[in-house]
Image (spheres, rainbow, N blue to C red):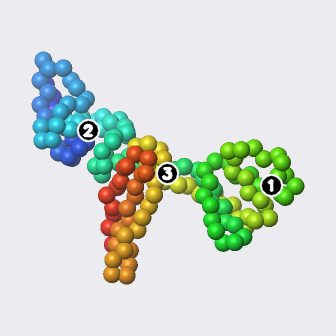
């Protein structure tokens, strides 16, 4: 006989439950409030890091990042490329393979490595949008075009 402290991953309901010696121990049961995953807090990190399809902020995982490069061109435009960036001079036009990110070195001003935030559900890049009102940014909304995940917006203070 023991007490088990449980927390719901969906609604954040928390309660200490009694576990009788006759009952079989389960790390995850059904939440009495919302029918979500009711997890023993000693094992909650194992379940919080799994992928979820919902947009519940309580289920969000730690931020993941994708390695990328920000290329600034001479004309002032920028391009963000994931993976390898290859620069060539004007003599190498016939040697280029399709599907690679090649840039003419005469047109590139800088190449800067950056990290792009990835979706916690599908690992695709996240689009960040700032919402404006009364002349200033009031919220930052992150959205994944791949699976539809959103953080619901975080209000700027």
In space, the residues marked 3 and 2 are separated at their CA atoms by 31 Å
- Left or right side of 55 for 146: right
Location of residue 35 by image quarter: top left
Q: Give coordinates of residue 46: x percent, y percent.
A: 35, 35
Residue at coordinates 80% horizontally, 55% vertically from top-left? 88
Q: Which residue is mark 1?
A: 88
Q: Give coordinates of residue 65: x percent, y percent.
A: 51, 50
- Tell me if label 2 and label 1 are in contact, CB under 8 Å: no
Location of residue 18 by image quarter: top left
Q: Which residue is mark 2?
A: 41
Q: Which residue is mark 3?
A: 125
Note whether residue 45 is visible: no
Residue at coordinates 84% horizontally, 58% vertically from top-left? 90
Note whether residue 28 is visible: yes
- Left or right side of 129 for 34: left
* Outermost residue to the bottom: 135
Q: Give coordinates of residue 32: x percent, y percent.
A: 12, 37
């Amino acid at each position: 006989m023991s007490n088990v402290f449980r927390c719901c991953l969906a609604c954040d309901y928390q309660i200490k439950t009694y576990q009788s010696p006759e009952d079989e121990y389960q790390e995850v049961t059904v939440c009495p409030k919302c029918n979500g995953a009711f997890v023993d807090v000693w094992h909650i990190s194992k379940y919080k890091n799994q992928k979820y399809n919902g947009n519940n902020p309580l289920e969000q995982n730690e931020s993941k990042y994708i390695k990328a490069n920000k290329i600034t061109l001479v004309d002032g435009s920028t391009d963000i490329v994931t993976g390898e960036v290859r620069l060539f001079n004007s003599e190498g036009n016939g040697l280029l393979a399709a599907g690679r990110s090649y840039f003419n070195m005469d047109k590139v001003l800088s190449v800067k490595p950056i990290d792009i935030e990835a979706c916690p559900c599908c690992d695709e890049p996240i689009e960040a949008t700032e919402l404006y009102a009364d002349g200033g940014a009031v919220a930052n909304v992150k959205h994944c075009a791949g699976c539809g995940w959103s953080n619901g917006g975080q209000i700027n203070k």
